[in-house]
Structure formats: structure tokens, C-alpha cells
Image: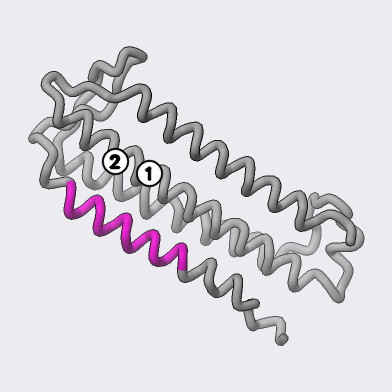
């Protein structure tokens, strides 16, 4: 495999990320018209709305966080990981050896892309919660749904981190 060719699993990673971005864009754009003129966007511990913004401002805000931020994050990680020569990794001498550094970089880029995909999913979930909260009168966020989603995201992050640590154990 040449140094410019990604392993098939890494190609799938990019396809999943792009598909998630497209789905997130479609989800936000097609559902934002369901929101009221003034959208409740911040809620207190009891789920009551404490801050509002216009529907147009909210749409730009959620698109920036669901689409823009993951793109910037993934682009930054790709830029850093694809060129770096010195990483703080477990068993770094082994994984940064000249015969393995290209695959190490490729893995780290792909791992960053998966993080971007997870983050986009989290932002779609947040948008769904805002949609649901704004259907209530007065707008009320479901704390139970919020914590279930947050717990699921952190569970995915633990698996994401575990995958990283397992990948860099010494064979």
C-alpha cells in the first residue's frame, strides 16, 4: 500500500463522516421550520427555558456547531496528525518507527474523523431536544432525555478512547 492510499476502513471512516454531515444538514434545515419565531435555547436545571433567540439565529447557530465545528476539528486534526513526527502515544518508539509512522498517522486521522462524526451526532441530538422542548408550552427540556443522550455520548467516547489505547498497545 502506498503512503498516499488509505486503508479501506479509513475510506469508510471518511464516507461515514461526510454522510453524517449531509444527514445533519438535511435534518437541521428540514426541521428548523417547525420552531417558533423565538426559540428557547437554554434551560435551567428543572428544564425551564431561560434564554431565547430568533429562529434564523438558532438555525445558523446549530448548523455552525453540528456542521462547521466538526469540519474545523477534523481538518485541524488531519493537518496536525498527517505531518507530525512526534506524538505522545503509548509505546511511541514502536509506533513512530519509520516503517510504521505512515500507518500511525493514518490511524490517528481516521480516529479524529470518528470523533467528528460522534460530535455531529451529539449536535443532532441536541437539536432534536430543542425541537421537542419548543413544542411544549411553555418550552421545557426533558432532563431525562438530555441525560440519556449525554450518557450515550460519553459511553461512545469511552469506547473511542479505549479503541485508541488498544490500537497502540505493543504487539
How far apart marks 1 and 2 lie (CA) works out to 6 Å
Q: Position of residue 133 (x, y in %)?
A: 22, 29
Q: Residue at x 11, y 46 (%)?
A: 33
Q: Quadrant of the C terminus?
A: bottom right
**46 is higher (above) or lower (below) than 14:** above
Question: Residue 61: which quarter of the image?
Answer: top left
Residue 15 part of the magenta-drawn span: no
Q: Quadrant of the N terminus?
A: bottom right
**68 is higher (above) or lower (below) than 130:** below
State the residue position of label 1: 123
State the residue position of label 2: 127
Q: Position of residue 143 (x, y in %)?
A: 35, 22
Q: Which residues are magenta?
A: 16-31
Q: Residue at x 34, y 46 (%)?
A: 124
Residue farthest along the top direction in this orientation: 46
Q: How is the image coloured?
A: one colour
Magenta stretch mostly in which secondary structure? helix
Crowding near pointer 2: few (<14 within 10 Å), some, many (20+)?
Answer: many
Left or right of 18 on screen, residue 115: right
Amino acid at each position: 500500500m502506498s503512503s498516499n492510499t488509505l486503508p479501506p476502513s479509513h475510506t469508510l471512516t471518511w464516507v461515514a463522516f461526510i454522510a453524517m454531515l449531509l444527514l445533519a444538514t438535511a435534518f437541521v434545515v428540514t426541521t428548523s421550520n417547525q420552531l417558533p419565531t423565538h426559540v428557547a435555547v437554554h434551560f435551567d436545571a428543572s428544564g425551564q427555558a431561560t434564554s431565547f433567540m430568533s429562529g434564523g439565529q438558532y438555525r445558523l447557530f446549530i448548523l455552525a456547531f453540528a456542521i462547521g465545528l466538526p469540519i474545523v476539528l477534523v481538518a485541524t486534526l488531519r493537518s496536525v496528525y498527517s505531518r507530525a513526527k512526534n506524538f505522545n502515544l503509548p509505546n511511541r518508539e514502536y509506533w513512530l518507527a519509520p516503517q510504521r509512522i505512515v500507518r500511525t498517522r493514518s490511524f490517528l486521522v481516521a480516529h479524529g474523523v470518528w470523533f467528528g462524526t460522534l460530535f455531529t451526532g451529539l449536535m443532532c441530538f441536541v437539536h432534536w431536544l430543542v425541537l421537542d422542548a419548543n413544542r411544549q408550552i411553555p418550552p421545557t427540556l426533558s432532563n431525562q432525555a438530555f441525560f440519556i443522550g449525554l450518557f450515550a455520548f460519553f459511553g461512545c467516547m469511552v469506547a473511542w478512547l479505549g479503541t485508541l489505547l488498544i490500537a497502540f498497545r505493543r504487539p
